[in-house]
Image (cartoon, rainbow, N blue to C red):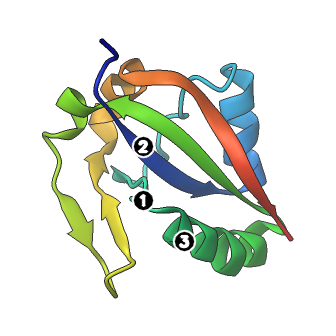
Amino acid sequence: MSEAVITLFRPTGPHELELVAASGYRRWPPRLPEQPIFYPVTNLDYATQIAQEWNVRQSGAGFVTRFQVRRAFMERYAVQQVGGALHTEWWVPAEDLEALNDNIVGLIEVIARFP
């Protein structure tokens, strides 16, 4: 029987992706002091929109990643709707990021690159 997981997506810029690569694509880097929340999103379309519209503008490149986290861990967080029906994400407090990393199943995959 396979483990129950939830698929998450995260738009990211080149610097954060370099840190993920340095971990062997197994962990997200710690949040910066001005980043109290780690917010993976629930769907590919929303992640693509952020990577194209925000990450490319901010850093010249945007990436969409996909990863799986144990369902039992993610169930402690509510999905937040932050705009239209498409704009849904989990809000994981920065202090819980290491626990999230410990609950990643498999690798963090880059599934799209922009521009």
Please name the residue shown 64% across and 76% down the image.
Answer: 54
Q: Residue furthest bottom?
A: 84
Q: Residues within 10 Å of mark 2 (few under 14, many from 20)?
A: some
Residue 25 rendering spot, x and y as whole percentages: 66, 26
- Quickly name the residue at label 1: 41
Q: Nearer the viewer, residue 11 or 67?
A: 67
Residue 47 rendering spot, x and y as whole percentages: 55, 65
- Report the side of 38 relative to 76 (left or right): right
Sequence-first tag of 1 and 2: 2
- Quickly name the residue at label 2: 7
Q: How many marks?
A: 3
Q: How far apart are the two marked residues, 1 and 3, measured between alpha carbons?
A: 9 Å
The label number, if any, that marks residue 45 in the structure image: 3
* Above or below for 115 versus 72: below
Q: In front of the other: label 1 or label 3? A: 3
Residue 43 rendering spot, x and y as whole percentages: 45, 62
Q: Residues within 10 Å of mark 3 (few under 14, many from 20)?
A: some
Per the image, label 3 sits on a secondary structure element best described as helix
Q: How far apart are the two marked residues, 2 and 3, measured between alpha carbons?
A: 13 Å
Residue 17 rendering spot, x and y as whole percentages: 71, 43
* Residue type at tag 2: Thr
Q: Nearer the viewer, residue 8 or 90?
A: 8
